[in-house]
Image (cartoon, grey):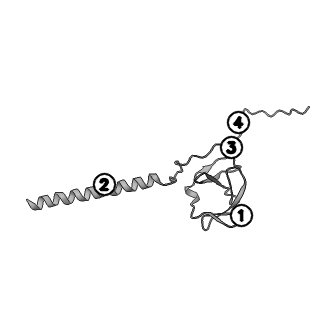
Amino acid sequence: MRYQFFKIFLLTGIIITAWNCSESAAVQESTSGTSKAGLDIQIPQNIVVREPSYFYQINTDYYIIAPSTMTVSDGSGNIIGTFSTSTGAIMSLSGDIIAINLDLSKLPVVAPTKPPKNLIAVDLDI
């Protein structure tokens, strides 16, 4: 009889441990700053880019990485640094490291804004 209780308690302990491990992994993944598809990040609507660019955010600071030139600009469009693909680092123009170990494949992409098709240009100088 004792052996059957031991097996039940052992099995219960294994199930509880497995349950707790899976719960902690799910909590850690959902509380990370960005998800794989970048769905946790809200990209501001006022950011304008000329080409599809990568978006990175630290607190309230926005960084836009242009893939063709690897230049980094702030949310206002001012160039503030460069991106190194070998280290995954954003470096300011003065050489300070802003962020490191970034994976561009995990960052959300900001698409260029296109003017609406019904936009008509009118020359007012007559």
Write down the residue under mark 2: 19
Kind of residue at disc 1: Leu
Q: Quadrant of the C terminus?
A: top right
Write down the residue under mark 4: 116
- Labels 1 and 2: the sequence-earlier one: 2
- The residue at the point 41 percent across, 53 percent down is 27
- Labels 4 and 1: the sequence-earlier one: 1
Q: Secondary structure at mark 2?
A: helix
Q: Is residue 88 above or below residue 63?
A: below
The label nearer to you, 4 versus 2, is 2
- Labels 2 and 3: the sequence-earlier one: 2
Q: Residue furthest left?
A: 1
- Labels 1 and 3: the sequence-earlier one: 1
Whole-percent x and y of residue 14? 25, 59
The label nearer to you, 4 versus 1, is 1
Write down the residue under mark 1: 93
What is the crowding at mark 1: few (fewer than 14 residues within 10 Å), some, or many (at least 20)? few
Q: CA distance from mark 3 to mark 4?
A: 9 Å
- The residue at the point 16 percent across, 60 percent down is 7
Write down the residue under mark 3: 113
Q: Quadrant of residue 90?
A: bottom right
Kind of residue at disc 4: Pro
What is the crowding at mark 4: few (fewer than 14 residues within 10 Å), some, or many (at least 20)? few
Q: Are marks 4 and 2 in contact (CB under 8 Å)?
A: no
